[in-house]
Amino acid sequence: MKKQVTVHTAGWIYAFIHFSVDAACFYFLFSRLNASPAWWALAVLYDAVAFVPQSFFGLLSDRFPKINFGFTGCVLVLAALVLPFDIPALLIISLGNALAHIGGAQHTLCGAEGKIAPCGIYVSGGSFGVIAGQLLAVSGFGGVLVPLAFMAISAGLTVAVAKIHLIEDYSSEGFDIASRLPLAVILLLTFVAVAVRSYVGYAVPSEWNSGTAQKVLLYCAMGAGKLLGGILCDKIGYRKTTFISLVVALPFLLFGNTFMVLSLIGIGLFSMTMPVTVGILVSKFPFNPCFAFGFTTVALFVGTFPAFFVRPEGLLAHQITVFVLSVVAAVCINMSLKKGK
């Protein structure tokens, strides 16, 4: 009999893979495209291609679960890093990112028996990877060899995970936390909640978020929040986790425009809603968990997009934005959750 690892172990392995993929992607963006006059357009294109197709790839993974999407994604990222043509390489590395994400979703949601912590662990790796890739590009340490090495290791790990994390049930039937509202309403509510979280994370910490050290702390706070959110959902429940994430975070966010420490605490807490929204959606799509995960990444792109162009300026605008968006997110999530969860 083949040795089996737990879904939590698969989550930690895919957290490393996620870290490596996002680090490679952002190394590519900041080492090869950052000087382009069309930088912002290219960054938006990357987000669109990396995030939006994940719902489609998720459906494919749910339909053909034996295909190793994680390995395919890692190979595409590897190829893009050495491809000399910038725009084709950008499209390939973005698609590779999307495919690798779906591989992680499959191994942390399918057969998880209602536990969302493995998915939170896996997703948290990406936040650390984003800033690591930027730092690699700025420092020039090791050149492209460093992300290539991490991606080669990650490609091997996707093969290993497929062999040692044997998924017997490709559904997520163990999740039962969504309210009985119509499916279309749940989709709308969770979409809005995810988009709000995405916008708050990227647009709200504006005045103090200007140096390298500040960016490192910001992305670390996001990653830690996603990780902690998944653990707390399984330990104390989704509603209590949502309360901590949105209500307790509010006073920190309200005055975090210029105070870095307050903002970091608020952003970390606010990021804890990530596993909550994923859990709600996989409850509504028990036989399509990868699609459910991919649906949230579409909302991530929608929330990130306006952050490129519109950010609250001044304390009053900041506080109004934070308060309104926090209320919207709280209402959407609480309406989506089943009573008692």
Image (tube, helix red, strand yellow):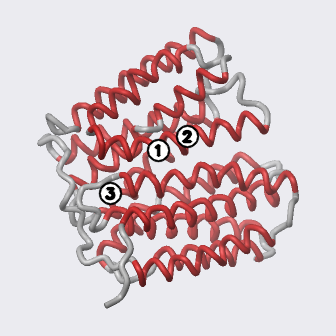
**Given this view, does label 1 or label 3 mark the residue nearer the observer?**
1
In the picture, measured across the screen, residue 19 lies left or right of residue 330, that is right
User: Gap in Å between the C-alphas at discs 1 and 3?
Assistant: 17 Å
Q: In this figure, which residue is indicated by the disc labeled 2?
A: 222
Q: Position of residue 114 (x, y in %)?
A: 24, 56
Q: Position of residue 17 (x, y in %)?
A: 56, 66
Above or below, 199 relative to 172: above
Indicate the quadrant where residue 218 lies: top right
In the image, 244 versus 184, the foreground residue is 244
Q: Contact (CB < 8 A) between labels 2 and 1?
A: yes
In the image, 259 versus 328, the foreground residue is 259
Seen at 63% across and 64% down, the residue is 20
Seen at 16% across and 39% down, the residue is 338
Query: Which SS class for mark 1?
Result: helix
Q: In this figure, which residue is indicated by the disc labeled 3?
A: 292
Query: What amino acid is at disc 2?
Result: Met
Residue most extreme to the top: 316
Q: Earlier in the sequence, mark 1 or mark 3?
A: 1
Q: In this figure, which residue is indicated by the disc labeled 1?
A: 226
Image quadrant for the C terminus? top left
Query: What amino acid is at disc 3?
Result: Ala
Mark 3 closeness class: few <14, some 14–19, many ≥20 residues within 10 Å: many
